Structure formats: structure tokens, C-alpha cells
């Protein structure tokens, strides 16, 4: 048994209330297979809509809902050796075999499925449309989240980046490193501390696995709408050099990689004579082709600036190319089909200082071209603040037009990072200027939607969770507002003042902690308060739900016990959440022009009419 499964079982952390932590979707195969074969078969759910065919026969997903453990039933088409197809199988009749839903088995199933049907949409893929126009949907709440995304894709009839999160920032990149206490930390200046990476608790493999099983349970795969999985902000270079092989291994099922050069750039010093450095370090033919390409895009090159930029990014570009080779090799090693090996690429440059100039975008895209890396999306910096509308729509339009003029010439779409919470007008401009050649990346928005869902639920346990969650952010805001750390204090006071001012209350309440507390406690609990919005994601893995820095991002049983509170919410809470997620996606699709107003109006009306969660879920599959 793997260490992670042993850890989860020992601490009674089961998949039903702690999904996607283990790469496997079955922790206890002896128990599950005994149930499935024996007298307790009635306790097992067989997902009829999950059925799919490979040359070996017909496959059905089954689950013990009490534990969340899943397995595969294979009904053989002929006399072939069924048990040899996957690992750890059990014969359940002359032409029937059962297998545990392990990650290793999932990788083999991907080959069997895509060998039989390259157009299958059971697994994430890199189909052409997904590399041109998409919405990036961060899936922090995994199994709670996917039904809403699948519903939106089904009823808008478009595929999206239906699974996305940053690795290793949000997702655990390696469960053994986690168990060994070897996770690094991520600085969060606004809370004046660092939090262990993987702050949402799920592993990248667990999420890769869960998003596929979710499609099978709902029957979404039968609609044959291709979707992608983005391993977001894959860090290149810097302190990540030492573990790049683990990053590559964890992301093998991702059909879309975002390269983030900032770790290497942060430690690159541009030599004083950049021109001489470039001349002796960068191949002359490559530089010549970059110059030609940039000029063809209609941009003039200032030689001094060009040398400085190339000297700054070249070490990172070389490492990116090396990493890209590893992603490719890993897929070639595991997957047998062309469609199974393909992946999309995004170059994130919004982490570079300042607003990105069109010249920088052109140089970066032509460097990638010269290195033989097709870039589907590029993310320049537009000066976006997370969760805030861009204040000047005309200025935004001008900025995007300049970037689009370059991207269009390179056949790249624009990735809008920090894309949550912009105004309808902002999204309209993004869609119109690029002709829908874009991706809007959203993630934090969906944690907010969970708060709204719980606050609106009539279920007592949901209400209690919401109350505790709100209280946690209020306490963090109070701690921050009187912290000795200047950044933490400044940010906390901004969040507190904003909430008070929007409620029509006096916002200068910082003469004493007691005055600040009584002002905040007089506010009705609301997911609209900025302090709740900013601190909320830290609650998911906070040991004991405690508003203490030392409790945040806790990967011990205490943190996972906290996480299980979210996965234990009521069916009503789940319905609200799925609806909220779907509604926001419909809003993005309409404003960006990915879907028509008529399609979106129809989808919204349909969303309103579900009496319960089962009705919504039943309406996802075909
Ligand atoms: Zn970015």
C-alpha cells in the first residue's frame, strides 16, 4: 500500500469527504472488491452513464458511496486476458473483471480509450479549439466544483479549461514530499507570513483523477465535448530546478501547461554589457530569426533594449525549453496515441515587472518560435488586480489592442490572468478586441461562490460552517489590522475599511483593537465583505479552523479534518454551489462572446428550475 493511502486510512480520511488527496480513487481495494463481489453488492453504486467501450470490452465505473472508493468493472468482449489489462484485478465471472481505480490503472485506461477512439472526450485533450478560445476554471473545490463546470459546458455546448490550478502553489505536487514534511512555503505578504504550498490540500494526481471520474459519473463524456486540464503556473528555474522531475511526473494528465518564468527571472542579474553577453551566449542564427520576426510584426527594435531583454530572459527560456522536453518525453513514455500525448502551452509573462510592452510580447513569442515551442496562449500584464474590475474600459481596450496586434501575427491567443471579478464591460472588451481568441483565468471567484452557497443554505450544518468561516476571516482581519508587519497591517486595514465603507459605516476604526472589533462585529456576516473575500481560501486547510498563522496550510490530519467539513455539506449547499459556478461561467461566456446571448439566457432559465441537486446532475450527461 502506498504511504499516502496508509496515512489516509489510518486517520479515517476517506475519499467521500476528502477527495483528490491520494492520486488513487480507491484506498482499500480488498474491502471494495469484497463488497462488489459479495453479499453487499447493493451498497455499491454502478454508474450506468459511465459506460464506455475499448477493444477489450465494456467498462463501468462503480463506487462505494460510504467511503468514496471506486473501481472498474470490465465486461469482456471476447476471450482475451482481462486481468492482464490493468493491475490488481479480480475475476468476477467468466468474462468479467474488477479493478481498483488507482492512478496507475487510470493511465492505462487512457491508452485503451484513445487507441479505440481518438476523438473520445473522456480524458482532457488539446483539441484545436481549446488552444484558441477557452475559459480557465480553477477547481479549488474539486468534486464539489466539477458538476457545475460540466453543466455549463453541456448547456453552452462548448469545451473549456475545465480543470485548472497552480502547482505547487495550490495543489500538492508530490504526496510523498508532503508526508515527508518537505513542502516548501509560499510567501503571502498580505497576511505577513508564508503558508505551506499546496494550500488547498489536494494533490495534482488526485485532481487529475477526480476530474475524469466526475465526467464519467455524470455521463458528460457522452456529449463528446472536448475539455482541457491546465497545470497552471508551472514554475521554471530558480529554486524549482531541484524538483522539476517531480513537477513533470505529477502533471502527466494535464493537456495544457502554463510556463511561469518568474522563479528564474527573480535570480537573473542582467550583465552590465548585455550586448556582449548576448553575443557570446545566444546563438547568432536564433537572434537573427527573432529580429526578423519582430520586425515582420511591425515593431521596431531598439538594440540596447533588445539586448537587455534577451539577456534577462535567455537563461529562463533555456530552462523552459528543457522542461518542455521533459513534459513531452513523459507523455511519450506513458501514452501510446498522438492525441494522448498532445498538450497546449501558455507563456505567462504577467509576472515580469510593469505593464508588458508589445515589443516584449513579440520578442518572447519569437524566442519561443525559434526554440520550436508552439505557444497557444500568452499572458501579458495589463495591470489587473485580482477580483477587481479594471477601472478604465477605454484604456483597457487600447492596451489589449496593442497586445492583440502582436499576438495575432504569431497565431497566439491572449491569456488574461487574475481574470476573476472583472466587469461585464471589461470582459466584453477582451472578447471583442481578440475576436474570442482568449482565455479568462478564474479561480478565487469559486471560493467566493462557496461562501455565497453556504450563506444561502437553510441546512444547519452549512450555516454553522459559514458562520465559522466568516468568523475566521474576521479574526484574521483584526490580527492583521494591528500587526507590526507594515504590509500586513496596511492590507488588513484596506479590507476592513472597504467592508465598513460599503456598509455605510465609519471606516476609520483603528484607534484600538477593541474599537475595530466592535465595528466589525456590528456588521452582518456577508461574503461580500472584502476581508472575507481576501482571507477565505486559507480556511480550507487551517488546522482546527483556527485563525492563527501557524494553523494555515496544515497537511496533517488536523488540516484534512478541517477540509472534510466542506466535503460534508448538504445537498442543498451543493446545489447552490453548482448553480453559482455554472452561472458565473455562463456570465463569462456571454460577456466574452464565446456563447450567444440567447444560448446563455436559455441556460440561466434552466439553471433556475432545478428542485434539487439530483435534477441538476441528471441534466449534465447525454
Ligand atoms: Zn500569470
Image (tube, helix red, strand yellow):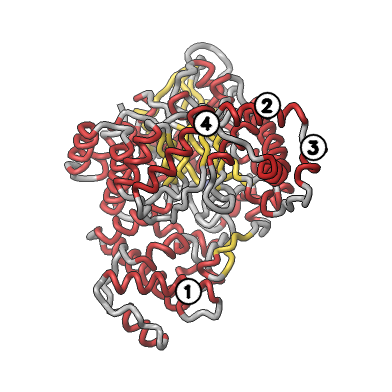
Q: Secondary structure at mark 1?
A: helix
Q: Secondary structure at mark 3?
A: helix
Tally of numbered tags: 4
What residue is shown with label 1? 490
First in residue order: circle 3 vs circle 2 = 3
State whether residue 206 is above or below residue 370.
below
**Marking on residue 289:** 2
First in residue order: circle 4 vs circle 1 = 4
Q: Is residue 3 left or right of residue 113?
A: right
Disc 3 to disc 1, C-alpha distance: 46 Å
Picture coordinates of residue 594 (x, y %)? Answer: 33, 33
Other residues around mark 3 within 10 Å, as few (<14) / some (14–19) / many (≥20): few
Is residue 270 shown to the viewer in this render? yes
What residue is shown with label 3? 279
Image marks 2 and 1: residues in contact by CB distance under 8 Å: no
Q: Is residue 395 left or right of residue 196?
A: left
Disc 4 to disc 1, C-alpha distance: 39 Å
Residue in the picture at 61% in, 24% down: 335
Amino acid at each position: 500500500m502506498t504511504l499516502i493511502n496508509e496515512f489516509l486510512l489510518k486517520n479515517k480520511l476517506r475519499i467521500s469527504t476528502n477527495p483528490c488527496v491520494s492520486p488513487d480513487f480507491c484506498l482499500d481495494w480488498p474491502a471494495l472488491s469484497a463488497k462488489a463481489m459479495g453479499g453487499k453488492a447493493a451498497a455499491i453504486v454502478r454508474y450506468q452513464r459511465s459506460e464506455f467501450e475499448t477493444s477489450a470490452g465494456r467498462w463501468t465505473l462503480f463506487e462505494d458511496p460510504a467511503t468514496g472508493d471506486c473501481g472498474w468493472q470490465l465486461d469482456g468482449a471476447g476471450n482475451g486476458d482481462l486481468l492482464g489489462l490493468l493491475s490488481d484485478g479480480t475475476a468476477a465471472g467468466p468474462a468479467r473483471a474488477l479493478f481498483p481505480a488507482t492512478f496507475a490503472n487510470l493511465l492505462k485506461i487512457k491508452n485503451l480509450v484513445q487507441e479505440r477512439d481518438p476523438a473520445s472526450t473522456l480524458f482532457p485533450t488539446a483539441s484545436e479549439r481549446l488552444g484558441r478560445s477557452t475559459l480557465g476554471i480553477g477547481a479549488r473545490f474539486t468534486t464539489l466544483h466539477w458538476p457545475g463546470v460540466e453543466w455549463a459546458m453541456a448547456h453552452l455546448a462548448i469545451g473549456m479549461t475545465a480543470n485548472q490550478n497552480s502547482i505547487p502553489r495550490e495543489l500538492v505536487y508530490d504526496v510523498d514530499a508532503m508526508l515527508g514534511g518537505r513542502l516548501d512555503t509560499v510567501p503571502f505578504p498580505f497576511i505577513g507570513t508564508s503558508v505551506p504550498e499546496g494550500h488547498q490540500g489536494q494533490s495534482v494526481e488526485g485532481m487529475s483523477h477526480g476530474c475524469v471520474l466526475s465526467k464519467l459519473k455524470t455521463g458528460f463524456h457522452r456529449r463528446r465535448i472536448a475539455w482541457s486540464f491546465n497545470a497552471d503556473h508551472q514554475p521554471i528555474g530558480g529554486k524549482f530546478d531541484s524538483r522539476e522531475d517531480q513537477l513533470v511526473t505529477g502533471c502527466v494528465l494535464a493537456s495544457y501547461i502554463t510556463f511561469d518564468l518568474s522563479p528564474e527571472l527573480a535570480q537573473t542579474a542582467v550583465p552590465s554589457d548585455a550586448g556582449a553577453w548576448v553575443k557570446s551566449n545566444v546563438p547568432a542564427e536564433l537572434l537573427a530569426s527573432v529580429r526578423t520576426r519582430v520586425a515582420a510584426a511591425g515593431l521596431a527594435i531598439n538594440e540596447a533594449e533588445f539586448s537587455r531583454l534577451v539577456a534577462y530572459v535567455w537563461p529562463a527560456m533555456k530552462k523552459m525549453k528543457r522542461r518542455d522536453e521533459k513534459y513531452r518525453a513523459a507523455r511519450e513514455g506513458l501514452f501510446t496515441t498522438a492525441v494522448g500525448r498532445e498538450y497546449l502551452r501558455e507563456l505567462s509573462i504577467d509576472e515580469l515587472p510593469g505593464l508588458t510592452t508589445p515589443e516584449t510580447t513579440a520578442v518572447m513569442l519569437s524566442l519561443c518560435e525559434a526554440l520550436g515551442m508552439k505557444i497557444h496562449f500568452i499572458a501579458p500584464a495589463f495591470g489587473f488586480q485580482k477580483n477587481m474590475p479594471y477601472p478604465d474600459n477605454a484604456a483597457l481596450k487600447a492596451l489589449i489592442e496593442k497586445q492583440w496586434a502582436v499576438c495575432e501575427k504569431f497565431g497566439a491567443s491572449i491569456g488574461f490572468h487574475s481574470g476573476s471579478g472583472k466587469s461585464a464591460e471589461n470582459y466584453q472588451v477582451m472578447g471583442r478586441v481578440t475576436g474570442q481568441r482568449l482565455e479568462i483565468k478564474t479561480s478565487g471567484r469559486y471560493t467566493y461562490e462557496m461562501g455565497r452557497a453556504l450563506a444561502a443554505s437553510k441546512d444547519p450544518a452549512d450555516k454553522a460552517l459559514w458562520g465559522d468561516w466568516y468568523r475566521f476571516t474576521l479574526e484574521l482581519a483584526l490580527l492583521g489590522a494591528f500587526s507590526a508587519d507594515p504590509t500586513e497591517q496596511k492590507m488588513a486595514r484596506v479590507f476592513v475599511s472597504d467592508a465598513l465603507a460599503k456598509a455605510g459605516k465609519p471606516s476609520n476604526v483603528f484607534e484600538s483593537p477593541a474599537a475595530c472589533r466592535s465595528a466589525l462585529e456590528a456588521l452582518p456576516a456577508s461574503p461580500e465583505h472584502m476581508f472575507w473575500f481576501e482571507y477565505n481560501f486559507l480556511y480550507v486547510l487551517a488546522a482546527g479552523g483556527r485563525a492563527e498563522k501557524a494553523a494555515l496550510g496544515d497537511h496533517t490530519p488536523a488540516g484534512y479534518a478541517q477540509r472534510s467539513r466542506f466535503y460534508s455539506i448538504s445537498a442543498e449547499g451543493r446545489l447552490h454551489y453548482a448553480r453559482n459556478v455554472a452561472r458565473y461561467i455562463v456570465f463569462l461566456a456571454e460577456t466574452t462572446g464565446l456563447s450567444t446571448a440567447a444560448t446563455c439566457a436559455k441556460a440561466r432559465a434552466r439553471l433556475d428550475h432545478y428542485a434539487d441537486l439530483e435534477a441538476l446532475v441528471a441534466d449534465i450527461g447525454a
